[in-house]
Amino acid sequence: MAENIEILYHREWHHRWLVLLALACTLLIVGFIALNAGSIHLTVADVISSLFSPAAVSPQTQMVVMDLRMPRILLAILTGASLAVAGTVMQALMRNPLVSPFTLGMSSAASFGAACAIVMSSLPLLSLLFMKYQDGFIVISAFVFGLGSIFIIYAISLRRGSTSATLILAGVVIGYIFQAGLMILQYTSNNEKLRQITLWLMGGMWGANWSAIFIITPIVILCLAYLLYKAWDFNALLAGDEVATNAGVEIKKVRLWGLFFCTLASSACLAFTGIIGFIGLIGPHIGRLIIGQDNRYLIPCSALLGAVILLVSDTIGRTIIEPVEIPVGVIMYLLGGLFFLYLILSKNNRIFT
Amino acid sequence: MRLNISNLAVAYDKTPIIKSISFSAAAGEVVGIIGPNGCGKSTLIKTLAGINVPSEGTVCLDNLDLFALPKIDMAKRVGYVPQDFRQMASITVLDTVTIGRRPHVSWALSKKDFEIINDAMKSMAILPLAGKRLDELSGGERQKVFIARALAQQPTLYLFDEPTSALDIRHQISVFRLIRSLAHTGGATVLVVVHDLNFAQYFADRIVLLKDGKIVAEGPPVEVMTRDRLRFMYGVEMCSIITDNGTYLLPEWEAGSDETIMEG
């Protein structure tokens, strides 16, 4: 069949916009359900009124919807979107399907940073200072270590003859080094600290509040906008470094800034939520299965997918056996994993390679 | 002259690969680059494509200093087809060819872009493969995809690094005919690394002969590719067979020892 390329392309184009639209609608609906769901039972009318005419509902209802549930929902959306986009872009930059914020050692480094902050708060001199600002200190420390680990990896990549395999190996090894540090901290800390560290490592949306949202939102929007703007460059990199160079991509620059913005967005979110794995790896792959490899569409698609998956998992996690909360990871790995298996098996599709 | 290369030198970790090369190529000309393995042919092509950084020398394309141009402007003028594609990810043929338009578009593709992509794919006969992934293709098909990608870039200087190494004889001929028409009808300048001396002799307007990173000879094929010179270059005795359709070069299978061949 010698079909016209433009027709073929436009057919795909329609399909892609449909997918994006469907995902955006899903996110809105899930968001609304999440506002409505929880151990304090509200009616749909309550939720709508507290969103649009706060005077019409009781202050308690207003507080539950706007101050408890809303920030949590936004945090889940921002975190899911950032991690999925970071995974998508990192996979394109390294041309490797196994790369995610997790596999490059960033999560281990951030965990180590958070654990450091938790343990250090018990040192006699610092304890006074930390009593007040411990949460802020955990956030900053996790963020700095996460970002630092990626720069170590980038410095390695600048050495002559280093391939993307070198980078991934370096990331895995750096992850282990930070793991070792984390284990020492866990082994030597007392019960209370150990519990705190473990809770942070499990990850969850319980740290959500409006000030977290105000800090993360601009960072995430800036990073995602930059990454989307560079979508053509990421596309070109998929055809190899030499071809990308010939297509006018400054590959070293694109790799550095791409990694930087991926890490910035995901570590800003992880600092508040603790470790959230899986989405950075699986989000992009589900995206590729339903929308293809073109990063101009794949990046928004992954962002929406990540947001939906995390939000659904968190909402189920906090409602399924209310008032007890199940860590978001439990639901996410189960649901996301099964959905991913279903996609692979049903579409008979291979992803990346 | 469209392309002026003067005193170009390239080194990998201080080991010189290209040692002060100078030559020119006109618009509408096919320049064949030949020479034994490791003589620096691919390094030369990659340097002109902006992949390797030269240690010395200048390259001017249409009176512009090629290495001083912003990368995007260089990409609009120079199209490169690599020799191997091991680095690629599993993307579709259409997505790959579309990358050729990247220097020319900011976000969306116009009707004209699609026409260019369509024509590029048509001339390589890969339209039916549009939706396939690169790793589902044969080596030859993949090579054609990457040629189409360079065509979609619509440069004035084409750089081909052994563009037919994975193709059968029929496709070799059709690719070389296309390369010749890019120059003769399209007015582009083409530099092509060729291993097959008969293809070089037939399709190139001029030959640049490289050995150990230096130019040994340069000129029309018949003048450059003499038996003495080829013996010196490759350590192989060649004989010419003259027919009504032209001259063919064939190796004398048993002449020359293996040692001289291996030493190049």
Image (cartoon, helix red, strand yellow):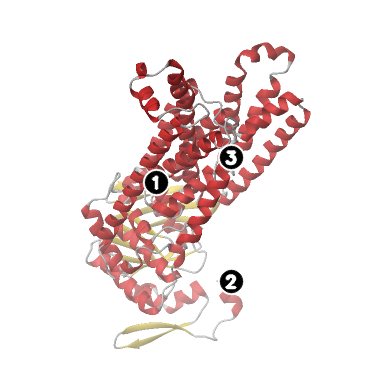
Front residue (pair B75, B203): B75
Q: Work out which quarter of the rendered image holds the N terminus of chain A and state it.
A: bottom left
Indicate the chain on which mark 2 is placed: B
Q: Residue B144 vs residue A277: left or right? A: left
> How far is mark 3 from mark 1, CA to CA?
33 Å
Nearer-N-terminus badge (3/1): 1
Residue A253, position in %: x, y?
A: 45, 40
> How far is mark 1 from mark 2, CA to CA?
43 Å
Query: Hey, what amino acid is under mark 1?
Result: Asp
Q: Is residue B150 above or below residue B176?
A: above
Depth check, mark 2 against mark 3: the one in front is 3
Indicate the chain on which mark 1 is placed: A
Q: Residue at x 39, y 52 (%)?
A: A291
Q: Residue A124 vs residue A312: left or right? A: right
Whether residue A203 is visible, yes or no, is yes
Residue B238, position in %: x, y?
A: 46, 82
Residue at mark 2:
B263
Query: Hey, what amino acid is under mark 3?
Result: Gly
Q: Secondary structure at mark 2?
A: helix
Q: Residue A342 vs residue A145: left or right? A: left
Q: Is residue B264 above or below residue A333?
A: below
Q: Secondary structure at mark 1?
A: helix
Front residue (pair A217, B210): A217
Residue at mark 3:
A329
Q: Residue at x 35, y 73 (%)?
A: B221
Residue A91, position in %: x, y?
A: 50, 48
Residue at mark 1:
A233
Q: Residues within 10 Å of mark 1 (few under 14, many from 20)?
A: many
Residue B182, position in %: x, y?
A: 27, 65
